[in-house]
Amino acid sequence: DNFIILSPISYIGASRKSKNARYIFAITIDLDGIDTKQHLSDLFFQIKNDYLPNPTYVSASGSGIHLYYQLEQPLPCYEEITKELSKLKDALTKKIWNVYTTTLYSQIQIESLFQGFRMVGTITKNNKRVRVFETGDKVNIEYLNSFVYDGYRANLKTKRKKKSKYTLEKAKELFPE
């Protein structure tokens, strides 16, 4: 197939809806408006000098690139966790879309945490193949948090357990075993 969209999230069910999301394996930033080699050079200069986080993979998707930050451990897609990760992803996107990395720095495109992207090997908009390059190691949330201000960091320490829709008494009644 020449057109496959894939997000770095596993799903259950027949459709890729956020309510069916189970685990997130990576945070992906889409960077468009890379019109010159200087943009790429400046992007990697900022990564090398610890101004931006080093992605695990960089995908050349046609008109832009995708920065994949593969997590050391997949995270469950509980609502509390995805809200925190979305906040972090938005802050990282705003930092990555800067005057040195893109011509579109004043028109930042904030994508959903659940956004799908063209799969490696499929056809791009300009009739080339999507290619990917390994550029770093897997990351953890603490590493990504270190690149944004306190108010935008993902706080997952108290958000690892899914809240039940039942009280303890109701759960005992419904599920006595």
Image (cartoon, rainbow, N blue to C red):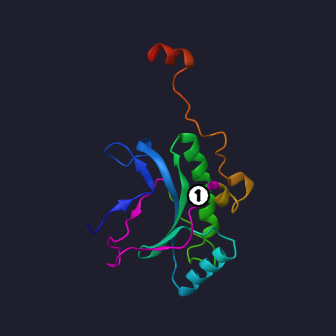
Q: Nearer the viewer, residue 78 or 34?
A: 78
In the rendered view, does 142 fall on the left or right side of 138? right
Q: Amino acid at mark 1?
A: Lys
Total marks shown come to: 1
* Region in magenta: 113-141
Q: Nearer the viewer, residue 109 or 65?
A: 65
Q: Nearer the viewer, residue 150 or 48?
A: 48
Q: Position of residue 174 (x, y in %)?
A: 45, 16
Residue at point 50%, 15% (across, down): 172
Q: Position of residue 79 (x, y in %)?
A: 54, 41
Residue at point 65%, 50% (across, down): 154
Does residue 79 sit above or below 133 in this rendering?
Answer: above
**Dot 1: element:** helix
Quadrant containing the N terminus in the rendered view: bottom left
Residue at point 49%, 51% (across, down): 24
Q: Nearer the viewer, residue 170 or 74?
A: 74
- For the stretch drawn in magenta, what is the main secondary structure? loop
In the displayed image of the protein, which residue is found farthest to the right? 150
Does residue 4 sit above or below 39 in this rendering?
Answer: above
Residue bearing the label numbered 1:
89
User: Is residue 157 part of the magenta span, yes or no?
Assistant: no
